[in-house]
Image (cartoon, rainbow, N blue to C red):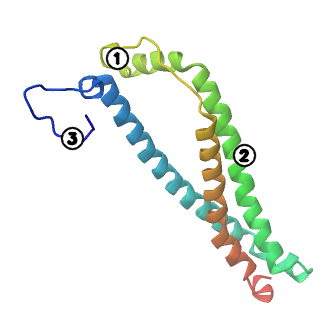
Amino acid sequence: LKRDEPRTGPLLVYRYQDLNSMFRALELQRSLAALVLGCLFVAAGFAVVAVTTMIVLQKTRDIGTVRALGLSRGGVLRTFVCYGVATSLAGVAIGLALGAFILDRIDWVRQTLAWMLGHDVFPVSLYGMKTVPHEVSWVVVLVIVAMAVGVSFFGSLLPAWRAARLNVVESL
């Protein structure tokens, strides 16, 4: 039977996915993980805009000085976009290292969370597994890294554009 096909007739047919609570829990976790990841990327975009804007405001005199010395508007734009992308690459490197560290010790993390919270966050009765399975999909990792760099690139464009449009005389 297909997922949305009604079950009518003298025999009731159930799929494994309909009866297994672990499968439903994993479906819910994946959809919640996608929602949380999307919210994190939106928040990260706002953070990049805020941080780059503050840097531009703090460096107004310096921008005026280098523009007076001959740096073009495009050079100022590239400088602040590269600053935003370099910051995100540092964050991606730290995140990858921290993620690999935690993933390597995932069962210890599960036990620590169970001890801290007072209950098992991955109960055997629900999942049917005594250890937390983990698998690294390098395609997903590369997509997340690309999205992080893309968010920081687009998030730093507006403040960089504002920095490039500063009037040299007024900024000095």
Q: How far apart are marks 2 and 3 (CA)?
A: 49 Å
Name the secondary structure under disc 2: helix
Residue 40 placement, left or right of 158: left
Tell which of 1 and 120 is nearer to you: 1
Q: Which amino acid does label 2 sit on?
A: Ala
- Measured as percent of width and height from the top left, residue 70 is found at 91, 81
Q: Mark 3 points at which residue?
A: 5
Q: Mark 1 points at which residue?
A: 123
- Measured as percent of width and height from the top left, residue 67 is found at 85, 80
Asked if residue 142 is positioned above or below residue 60 in the image, the reply reads: above
Nearer-N-terminus badge (1/2): 2
What mark, if any, has residue 90 been given in the picture? 2
Name the secondary structure under disc 1: loop
Q: Which residue is drawn at 64% across and 25% down?
A: 101
Q: Distance between the residues labelled 1 and 2?
A: 36 Å
Q: Residue at x 73, y 65 (%)?
A: 81
